[in-house]
Amino acid sequence: MRAQAPVAPAAYSALYAAPAAVAARAPRLVRYDLHVRDTTWTIAGVSNHALATNGSIPAPTLTFTEGDTALIYLHNQTRKTVSFHWHGLLLPNRYDGVPMLNTELIEPGQVHEFRFALKQHGTSWYHSHTRLNEQLGQYGAIVIYPPTPLALPDQVVLLSDWTKENPWEVLRSLKRETDWYAIQRGSVQSYGLALATGNLGTKLRQEWKRMPEMDLADVYYQSDLVNGQPTRAAPLAPGQSVRLRLINGSAASYFWVQFAGGKMRVVAADGVDVQPVPVDKLLIGTAETYDVEVTLPAAAGQYELRATSWDMAKHTSLLLGTGPLHAAPDLPKIDYFQLVKEMNGMMSQMQGMTMGRAPAHVPPPSVAAAGSAPMPDMPGMNSQGMAGAPKSQPAAMPGLNMPMDSSAHSQLDKSAMPGMAMAGSDGMQMAGMKMGGMKKAPLGTFVTGHKQLQAAFPNETLLNYEMLKAPQPTAIPADRPVRTVQLYLTGNMFRYVWSINNKTLSDADKIEIKQGETVRFVMHNTTMMSHPMHLHGHFFRVLNGQGDYSPLKNTLSVAPMDVVTIEFDANEEKDWFFHCHLLYHLNSGMARIVHYANTAVPLANPRQVARFTAEDRALFPYGRVDAFSQGVFAQGGVRNSYWLLRADAAFNYRGSYETETHVQRYLGPKQFVAVYAGTDIRNNTRGGANTATDAPGQPTRSGNSKDFRQVACVGIRYFLPLLVWSDLRLDHQGKMRVQLERDGLPITRHLRADLMVNSDREYRLGSSYILGKYVALAGNYDSNYGWGAGLRFIY
């Protein structure tokens, strides 16, 4: 199939490009050679294997001027494949840097050339798109200056996170359902804490609804970093103003940014200018960038620019100026039970929204003829909550009975929308808008800690997306068809499976669009976590209530329960990636390929593309061994997003033993149902085990008894309220067993309880005190083996 050339750029390109000024400059070729090597890197006393670029972490800052041609040679001097994606840059598809999708694999020893013209200016960054390499240090800043000089000097502020663990081990641990990271962050919502703080009812409702513990972050990091270190200094003069290029280059962290010297003036988002907004604090999502201007006070001193991880676990600092330290204020700890209450309240108001799951029938993409597209959703509004209207056809509102395009907000009949204050032709200010009687949080802020932080600093201004406004109109011309795609952000936090429309990348079809369309993605976040969604190769308008002046971004954090619409001009070709930029969510399946119809795919090898999409099906081993005084209890196996191979075994020191082995398949979008087949082999008739009869009148050593058994079985498991797994099993001799099991009941921050009972009159009560990620003190009473205690080893 013959590839088509990209169509003309969007009408909003003037915001990030200055072609007239570029034409006045002599063309320039700017070359960089990037050498990626394996190394051991130490930060704040924590060493780990890393990937250094030109001997540094982060990678070197690449600087250009709009109109330059970038010539970049990537030298792979590692033992495996590497890559770099040029995040936020508009460039030919083959240079986008996603291996096996649109860029060739760069094998060990190879040198790969990237050559592309820079047709934009602003703050951006680059990072690996191979496996989990970004977490190992493969990231750096990109600064593209406009053809005319800036009014202020600038400083790159590249934020990131650093772990002592292998990133694969981090992901394996998340799949393992460990709560060790929550213990380290202090975010465990235990029953003891709930009782002590008057939140026992909240905790019970949370588990009755089968909700996981509330959390903001997935991973505990040893350090948060600015430009590669926990603390950096920039010796500026008193009274000096500077433009700070904030880049969140972390793998899985959001940061609250504040400046001890006064307000910050937000002047750009994702490298694109916005109308200046003075703020005291801003939350920068993973992969986002903001340009802010600050002015140092006249008094000499080091004024702290502090970035605090949004779980309030740690912070990193850039000290501006010289002299005595002026620290930014500490931020209050997160009240996680309050976040649970907010989530419960919102869920009760949103008709048709199910936690973690898309509707049974997601409306297929629709295409409206030019000039006849319906009005997109307002910021944060879910039209399912509007008089129960189905999502595919928003409920009628007085004054809105007309075809709408993306610039039609200014045509609204203001008098027909009581309670919605209008902001002239600039768009709608949704102040005071309520959903089912509950006031809606500003776009991008719900269950992020924003509400608690605002309460702690009531006189300060905290940035939210609804404050962002483009300095020039960004409306896409209405003379083109509008394609609308409904995207539900879904997932299973218990098993750490992340998806879109209930499907991981490996199971999903491409999102097909056509050149010349206006494409709208309507994103519904049904999960309990925020997701920074990034679209490669495009800028999109965030429909945030600013009408024709909607801001442009390439990454948008979609908060829990938010419904937000973005739209972009389909002016490219081939395949582009769209995904959550939390590294471990991406590698667990929350991604899609956006395909331009009737254009050739960039790589001819379909096996490579299949290999690329199958990464969320990787297998992860796990295991646990309880070495107790009365015997040994063990479990282990391998798992991926849909399958589990599990073996359970127990034996005492007198020769009794029992084993169960299952191959299990999880079903349904929330994976609350699983079916399995396996074996049950045991002999507890030897000395020391419970050798009582299985049931009145039944001898112990029968062919299929509680104490002696060699059977094949099939079964079905169902996840009940209060996080209890029920298990109905039938063996090949026709015997049925019912079992209930709850593991990891949180009593305190470190103390857990385990319970199991079944219809064979077997039961087990256990507890453990977690000492570290891989070890705990533990004990139990087992109906077959009696009392015992010892050490638990966890993998």
Image (cartoon, rainbow, N blue to C red):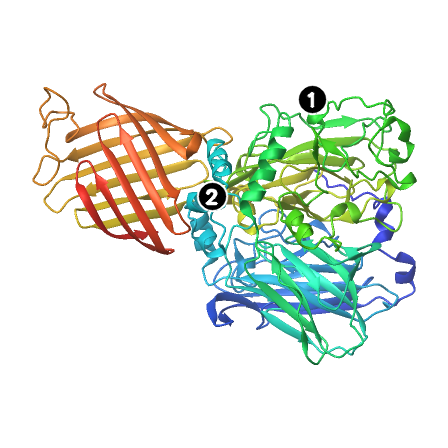
Residue closest to the eye, 697 or 262: 262
Assess disc 2: are there few (<14), some (14-19) or many (≥20) residues with their C-alpha within 10 Å of its C-alpha.
Answer: some
Answer whether residue 288 is visible to the viewer in this image: no
Q: Name the mark on residue 194.
A: 2
Amino acid at the residue labelled 1: Pro
Query: For residue 543, what is the image quadrant?
Result: top right
Q: Name the mark on residue 390.
A: 1
Expressed as whole percent of the image width and height from the top left, the position of residue 293 reads: 79, 64
Amino acid at the residue labelled 2: Ala
Q: Earlier in the sequence, mark 2 or mark 1?
A: 2
Answer whether residue 443 is visible to the viewer in this image: yes
Expressed as whole percent of the image width and height from the top left, the position of residue 60 reads: 65, 69
Residue 48 vertical position relative to residue 605 in the rendered view, above or below: below
Query: For residue 115, what is the image quadrant?
Result: bottom right
Dot 2: element: helix
Q: CA distance from mark 2 to mark 1?
A: 38 Å
